[in-house]
Image (tube, rainbow, N blue to C red):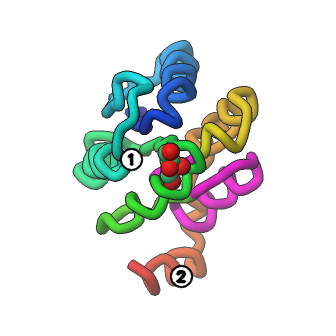
């Protein structure tokens, strides 16, 4: 599995923790930046991560900013992206099973790193259900 990950300055520190966490599990991570906690513009990183997912260079993407909201808005503008803002494990699992979400967004100023890592684990280990009703609903907005 390959994960592309990106963050703005608000999510930079949590991004580093998630990268370490995933690499400890032998998961390949493509870090799309940012590369410091200096102020920067989240849409650039949303696009970089989304492009990797759309081109299938990554299986799933993770985006972190202060709230996760800007990242999810920006990522969802890109065709083929279904980005889900999740701050709990139930939503992370449900959005993979029901929405076939391909990008996880989180707000580093909203949740702690312990919960964020659990949400990442839930998201990447859950498959889409492939249920007809969920496929139909996704097609209705794709
Ligand atoms: C940056 O201050 C903040 O606006 C950003 O990280 C994010 O929360 C935007 O949605």
Q: Considering the numbered disc 2 on the image, is that residue within a helix, a strand or a loop?
A: helix
Residue 88 forms part of the magenta stretch:
yes
Kindly report the distance in space between the C-alpha atoms of the residues bearing marks 1 and 2: 29 Å
- Of callouts 1 and 2, the N-terminal one: 1
| Quarter of the image with the N terminus in it | top left
- In the rendered structure, the answer to whether residue 115 lies left or right of residue 60 reads right
- Give the residue at x 48% y 28%: 12
- Give the residue at x 38% y 47%: 42
State yes or no: discs 1 and 2 in contact (Cβ < 8 Å). no
Residue 114 versus residue 120 in the image, above or below: above
Residue 43 versus residue 58 in the image, above or below: below
Q: Identify which residue, 86 or 94, lies in the foreground.
A: 86
Q: Position of residue 120 (x, y in %)?
A: 61, 37
Q: Identify which residue, 32 or 138, lies in the foreground.
A: 32
Residue 53 forms part of the magenta stretch:
no
Q: Identify which residue, 41 or 54, lies in the foreground.
A: 41
Which span of residues is magenta-colored?
Answer: 85-106
Mark 1 residue's CB less than 8 Å from ligand 1: yes
Q: Residue furthest bottom?
A: 140
- Give the residue at x 43% y 44%: 61
Query: Where, by quadrant of the figure, is residue 30 drawn?
Result: top left
Residue 58's tag is: none
Residue 137's tag is: 2
Q: Position of residue 118 (x, y in %)?
A: 71, 34
Q: Residue furthest front?
A: 39
Q: Which residue is mark 1?
A: 42
Q: Residue furthest top?
A: 24
Q: Considering the numbered disc 1 on the image, is that residue within a helix, a strand or a loop?
A: helix
């Amino acid at each position: 599995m390959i994960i592309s990950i990106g963050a703005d300055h608000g999510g930079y520190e949590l991004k580093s923790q998630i990268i370490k966490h995933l690499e400890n599990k032998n998961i390949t991570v493509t870090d799309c930046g940012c590369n410091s906690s200096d102020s920067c513009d989240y849409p650039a990183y949303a696009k970089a991560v989304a492009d990797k997912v759309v081109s299938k260079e990554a299986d799933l993407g993770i985006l972190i900013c202060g709230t996760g909201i800007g990242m999810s808005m920006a990522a969802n503008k890109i065709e083929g992206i279904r980005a889900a803002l999740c701050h709990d494990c139930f939503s992370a699992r449900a959005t993979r099973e029901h929405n076939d979400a391909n990008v996880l967004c989180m707000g580093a100023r909203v949740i702690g790193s312990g919960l964020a890592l659990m949400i990442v684990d839930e998201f990447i280990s859950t498959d889409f259900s492939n249920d007809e009703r969920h496929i139909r609903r996704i097609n209705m907005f794709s």
